[in-house]
């Protein structure tokens, strides 16, 4: 049988973002291949929007051959956008819609219409290890090489997750040649930022990389100044000819007020300025601290097999006061709650994998065997002061006066949660014939959770197990085209307990996808189109016998289509575009209106960005480009079935379009000057909402000037 052998020499080692010495050693034993030149550190140009690998897929198959929609947002795309935070790129990926961001304190989006946990944000991996548990500040991109968006269920590889999709953040790694970059930025709303990226060998067998960043901004809204610091060291140690040990670390401190945004008056937005802050400035900032460290040991046994072991530790914390809207009176008086939060979490995980090739019945197989375990603890204390008619702790939304006497928050939440999990997983990528790829995966999770309520001295426990299969098939009729289909299942445990103090059944999802991929003969352009349908069951809904409790009886469905196109269309132009249509609706619920959409999920999202590059006659390079995003109308507050039956109008966030411009000039080989203009036409828009009382407005027009010096 004339089928291609899936060669271990092409495997990306664990979570490596650049070709490691181990992989290079293996490749040196085969025919030479053309490799993309390594781009020096710093904000880059003349690189690619495409990537042939997605490490989170855990296969050596090129992205085009994997039977799944995958979008890799490369470093070049990040740099062209001038992106410094993860949420800067969300609008330029198909099927992504912004969700409640907990007052701007963490990232949260829905993938294919299905949101992550509103209390912890979107399901995210960091170098292939789960990184969404805990309290994660908005992710900084100073130490990020690329972002991988895996559409559809990832439970067959990663366990508990949303069926819409998963993000994998890939860290920058040490290079074996010295390179340094210093960047500084200043802009509107008191914005400044300084960053350092330094890498190189410390010895023949040891290399380092260090990314530092410090940032401060006043914010476009009143009293919302913030600051952050990032320290991200990484080391690579060649322990032997076939063995490598890596360390990847990151510390992030982010401090900002918890800002719930503006209110809608009688369901109408725009009644107060988008800059108006409705909290209390004297509350100060809420401080988040995230510390991540990973140790990755990789060993190549022979030309066919390698093993990798990953030990990961994460600590997160959130602490501070906030004042949040609770009820709006007809005279414009806004009653507010004052809260104090003190949250901490610890997450220790271990992953062991064996990956390689074998041949069964003359058919090549690429096999992945994996084991994963983790222990996660979360300590949550919240104090809250509820307003009353005698002491409303109110503010006039039309003429706010700050500085009134603040109530002392009283006991509200005091819990300690422990999660443990042990899982085994298997993936087999099979070359059935020259033009066929079959990918099958299965993961078995044994999960346990205990939640101690220290106020009531009660503890609830659950120990669900889950089996998550996945099956996908790709047909490659030519070197440019792929047709694929897949189906997968997912699960996610529901926290808490019902009125009988029994644990809830986990959420369960099932997804189907049908799509096609295209790649130009020179591999500089690529497109992806997909149709999908996802059902999620056991969603928590109100208990009809006691509305103070919940039951796992809800069901939602999401279905839609996506089209993405990106790459180098000419030597001087590169483009990235995406459009998606998503129809998500409630199928079963004891409270929510049946047939209604979920919060913040627009039917249509579209985006496009482009960059043009050239050189002056004196050899100095320059580039200019920009992007536009369109986000359709979406639900801003959930309606009950009773409200829908009574004809109560739905509160929707209006559609909007924003435009940005980007330009750079490189007067010398080492110096690059940049100009970024966001929201060029100063459009008033709203990114997400939790209710008419908590609506997050988007930023007005802003300018950022930057200088990057490489040496």
Image (cartoon, rainbow, N blue to C red):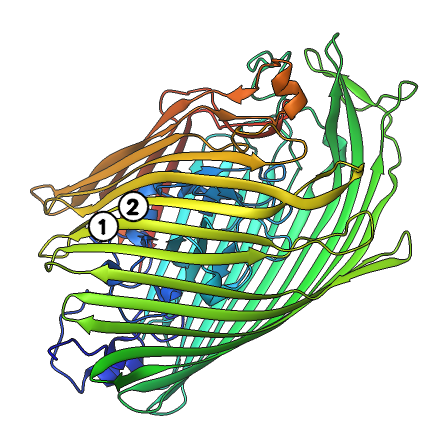
Q: Spatial distance from mark 1 to mark 2, Cα to Cα?
A: 6 Å
Residue shown at 49% from the left, 28% from the top: 698
Q: Quadrant of residue 616?
A: top left
The quadrant the C terminus occupies is bottom left
Report if the CB atoms under discs 1 and 2 are less than 8 Å apart: yes
Question: Is residue 314 visible to the viewer in this orientation of the structure?
Answer: yes
Please state the horizontal and vertical placement of residue 677, each as a whole percent of the image: 36, 31
Compared with 692, 242 (above or below) is below
- Say which of 576 and 408 sits in front: 576
Q: Which residue is mark 2?
A: 530
Residue positioned most to the top: 331
Q: Quadrant of residue 476?
A: bottom left
Q: Dot 2: within a 10 Å radius of its alpha carbon, few (fewer than 14), some, or many (20 or more) residues? A: many
Residue shown at 26% from the left, 85% from the top: 360
- Say which of 327 and 678 sits in front: 327
Q: Which type of secondary structure does the marked residue at label 2 adopt?
A: strand
Please state the horizontal and vertical placement of residue 47, each as a whole percent of the image: 22, 54
Please state the horizontal and vertical placement of residue 363, each as a whole percent of the image: 22, 80
Q: Dot 1: within a 10 Å radius of its alpha carbon, few (fewer than 14), some, or many (20 or more) residues? A: many
Q: Which residue is mark 1?
A: 516
Q: Earlier in the sequence, mark 1 or mark 2?
A: 1
Q: Which type of secondary structure does the marked residue at label 1 adopt?
A: strand
């Amino acid at each position: 049988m004339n089928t291609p052998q899936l060669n271990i020499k092409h495997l990306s080692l664990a979570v490596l973002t650049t070709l490691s010495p181990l992989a290079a050693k293996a490749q040196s034993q085969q025919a030479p291949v053309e490799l993309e030149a390594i781009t020096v550190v710093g904000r880059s140009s003349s690189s690619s929007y495409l990537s042939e690998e997605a490490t989170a897929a855990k296969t050596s198959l090129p992205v085009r051959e994997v039977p799944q929609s995958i979008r890799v947002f490369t470093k070049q795309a990040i740099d062209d956008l001038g992106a410094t935070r993860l949420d800067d790129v969300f609008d330029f990926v198909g099927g992504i819609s912004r969700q409640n961001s907990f007052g701007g304190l963490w990232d949260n989006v829905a993938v294919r219409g299905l949101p992550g946990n509103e209390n912890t944000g979107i399901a995210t991996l960091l170098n292939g290890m789960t990184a969404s548990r805990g309290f994660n500040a908005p992710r900084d991109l100073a130490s990020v090489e690329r972002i991988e968006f895996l559409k559809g269920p990832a439970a067959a590889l990663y366990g508990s997750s949303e069926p819409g999709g998963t993000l994998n953040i890939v860290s920058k790694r040490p290079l074996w040649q010295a390179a340094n970059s210093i960047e500084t930025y200043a802009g509107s709303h008191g914005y400044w930022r300084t960053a350092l990226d330094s890498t190189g060998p410390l010895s023949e067998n040891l290399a380092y990389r260090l990314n530092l960043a410090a940032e401060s901004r006043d914010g476009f809204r009143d009293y919302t100044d913030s600051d952050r610091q990032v320290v991200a060291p990484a080391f690579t140690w060649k322990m032997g000819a076939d063995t490598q040990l890596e360390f990847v670390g990151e510390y992030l401190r982010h401090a900002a007020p918890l800002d719930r945004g503006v209110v809608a008056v009688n369901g109408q937005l725009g009644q107060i300025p988008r800059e108006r802050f409705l909290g209390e400035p004297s509350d100060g900032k809420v401080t988040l601290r995230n510390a991540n460290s990973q140790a990755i040991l990789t060993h190549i046994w022979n030309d066919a097999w390698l093993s990798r072991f990953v030990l990961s530790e994460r600590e997160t914390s959130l602490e501070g006061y906030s004042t949040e809207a609770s009820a709006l009176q007809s005279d414009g008086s806004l009653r507010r709650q004052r809260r104090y939060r003190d949250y901490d979490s610890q997450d220790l995980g271990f992953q062991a994998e064996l990956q390689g090739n074998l041949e069964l019945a003359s058919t090549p197989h690429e096999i992945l065997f994996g084991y994963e375990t983790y222990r996660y603890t979360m300590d949550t204390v919240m104090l809250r002061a509820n307003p009353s008619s005698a002491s409303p702790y109110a503010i006039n939304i039309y003429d706010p006066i700050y500085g009134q006497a603040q109530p002392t928050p009283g006991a509200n939440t005091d819990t300690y949660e422990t999660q443990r999990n042990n899982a085994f997983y298997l993936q087999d990528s099979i070359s059935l014939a020259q033009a066929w790829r079959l990918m099958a995966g299965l993961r078995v999770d044994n999960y346990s959770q205990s939640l101690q309520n220290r106020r009531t001295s009660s503890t609830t426990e659950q120990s669900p197990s889950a089996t998550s299969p996945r099956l996908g098939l790709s047909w490659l009729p030519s070197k440019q085209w792929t047709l694929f289909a897949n189906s997968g299942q997912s699960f996610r445990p529901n926290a808490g307990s019902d009125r009988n103090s029994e644990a809830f059944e986990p959420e369960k999802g099932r997804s189907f996808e049908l799509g096609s991929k295209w790649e130009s003969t020179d591999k500089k352009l690529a497109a992806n189109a997909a149709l999908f349908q996802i059902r999620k069951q056991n969603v928590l809904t109100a208990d009809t016998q006691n509305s103070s409790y919940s039951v796992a009886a809800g069901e939602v469905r999401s279905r839609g289509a996506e089209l993405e196109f990106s790459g180098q269309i000419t030597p001087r132009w590169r483009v990235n575009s995406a459009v998606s249509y998503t129809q998500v609706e409630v199928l079963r619920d004891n409270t929510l209106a049946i047939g209604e959409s979920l919060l913040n999920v627009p039917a249509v999202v579209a985006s496009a960005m482009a960059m043009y590059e050239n050189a002056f006659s004196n050899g100095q390079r320059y580039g200019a480009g920009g992007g536009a995003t369109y986000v359709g109308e979406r639900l801003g507050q959930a309606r009950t079935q009773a409200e829908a039956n009574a004809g109560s109008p739905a509160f929707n966030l209006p559609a909007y379009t924003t435009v940005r411009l980007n330009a750079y000039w490189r007067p010398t080989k080492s110096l690059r000057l940049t100009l970024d203009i966001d929201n060029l036409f100063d459009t008033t828009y709203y990114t997400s909402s939790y209710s008419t009382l908590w609506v997050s407005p988007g930023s007005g027009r802003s300018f950022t000037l930057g200088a990057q010096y490489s040496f």
